[in-house]
Amino acid sequence: MVARGVSICGIGVVSAYGWSRRSLWDGLASGKPAATVVPELGRNPGETVWAARVGDGGDPLDGPSRFAQAMRAAAREAIEDAGTRGWRPGRRVGLLHAVVLGEVDLWRDFYVTRGGSLPVHDYLALMPSTPMSMLMQEYGFHGPAMNVSAMCASGNAGLITAKAWLDAGIVDDVVFVATDLSLTPENVAHFVRLGVAIVDAEPLDACRPFQLGSRGFVMGEASVAFVLSRHASRPYAVTLGGAMSHDAYHVTSIDPQLDQITACFTDALDNAGVSAADVRYLNAHGPGTAQCDAAEAAVLEQLFGPETEVYSVKPLTGHCQGAASAIEAAVTAMAYDTGVIPAPPVVAPGHPALLDGVTPLADGLTIKSSLGMGGHNSAIVLAPPS
C-alpha cells in the first residue's frame, strides 16, 4: 500500500508560536507551551485566561481578519515549501479547507457592533468561500474547492478526503488547509462551562494527557496547510490511509463501550494495508480530559503491542479545535523529516507508553487519532517517505 500512499510534500503553519512552521517546531522543541495569559479573552475585569491564541502578523492584503490572513499565509508557506521539495502543480489542483467556526471576529462585529449592516464588499469577507476564492485566484488553481467540517477531527477528515480525491483521479494535487481562530470571550467561557477547557492554570499544570492530575485542555488556535501529491521528490511523510466513523451516542460524551472508536482504528489500518504490529507511535487526540484519554489508552492497550508509544502535543500547542488534528499531523510529518518527536515533558505519573520530552524517532508507522465532539471518530496512518 505504500505505493498507493499520498505524499505530504509541503507544510505551512500559523500557530500561537508564530507565523511559520519553523516557529512551531522551535516552540515544540523548547518544551514550553505556546499559551500565555490573554486578558482580552476574559469576560470579567482581571480574569486570568490562559490560551494559545494566534497573534497579529499576517498581511492585510490577504483579508480583513486574522482568520483569512492566517489561512492564506499557511497555504502560501506550504505551496512554496512544496516547490522547494520538487513539487510542480498539475492541471487540476484542488483545495480543501477545514472550518468549524469561521470568521468569528468578523461575525461578532457584524452582529454586535454593526447591527447587522455592512457594505456588500465587507459582507462578502464573512463568507467561507471568499478566502478560498482568493487563494485559488492567487495561484490559478482550477480543481474542485470545498469546505470540510468534523469538529476536532476536521484535520483528519480533510486528509482522508484529499487522499480519496487523488485515489479517484478527481485531482492531480490537493492543497489542504485547516483553520480555527475562534477564541472569543464567549466561546472560551462556554468551553469552560462544558467542563473541558481550563483557563485558570498554566498549561502543563492543567493539561496532562495520560497523566495523573489532568483537568482538561487549554484552548488554542492555528491554521495549518499541506500540499498532497504523488509527484514530489522529497516528501515529509506519506499518508497511507485512514478511516472515520460516528458513535451515534451523545453530543459530547464518548460511548463507553468504545466499539466505534476501536473499529475506526482497525478500519484505518485495513484501509492503509498495514497491521497494528507495524505501528510504532500513537499520535493521540489526547486532550487531557478523563474520558478521551481513557478511551485512547484502552485502544492503545487493546490493539497495539508494547513497543507502540503514545504522545499528545496539546499541552504545548493548546487544543486548536478544528485545526487540532492538522497541526498534530504536521508534527508527525516534520518528525519524520527531522528524526525527533517533540513530545511534551511528562510532569506527573502517567501511562508507561507515554513519551517524555523530545525523543529520537524510531522506525515504524504513526497512527494519528482525533475524536471530535459529537461522536466524530477518525484515524489516519502516516509513514516515513522511504
Image (cartoon, rainbow, N blue to C red):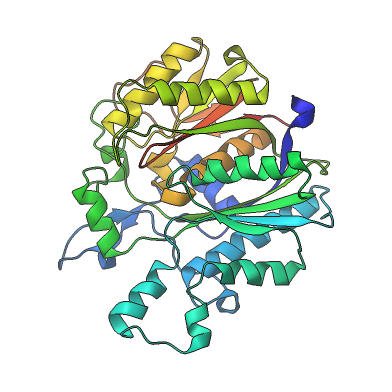
- Number of numbered discs visible in the structure rendering: 0
How far across and down, in percent of the image, does residue 179 sit?
A: 51, 57
Q: Residue at x 47, y 81 (%)?
A: 123
Task: Return the residue found at the far top.
Answer: 306
Q: Is residue 13 above or below residue 338?
A: below
Tell me: 289 left or right of 143: left
Name the one closer to the observer, 250 or 105. Answer: 250
Q: Is residue 348 above or below residue 308?
A: below
Q: Residue at x 64, y 70 (%)?
A: 133
How far across and down, in percent of the image, does residue 225 sit?
A: 61, 53
Tell me: 381 left or right of 86: left
| Res. 379 in view | no
Task: Return the residue found at the far front.
Answer: 248
How far across and down, in percent of the image, does residue 99 sit?
A: 49, 56
How far across and down, in percent of the image, does residue 132 sit?
A: 61, 66
Task: Return the residue found at the far bottom.
Answer: 119
| Res. 297 in view | yes
Tell me: 255 left or right of 358: left
Work out which quarter of the rendered image holds the C terminus and state it.
top right
Name the one closer to the observer, 132 or 30. Answer: 132
Rendered image quadrant of residue 156: top right
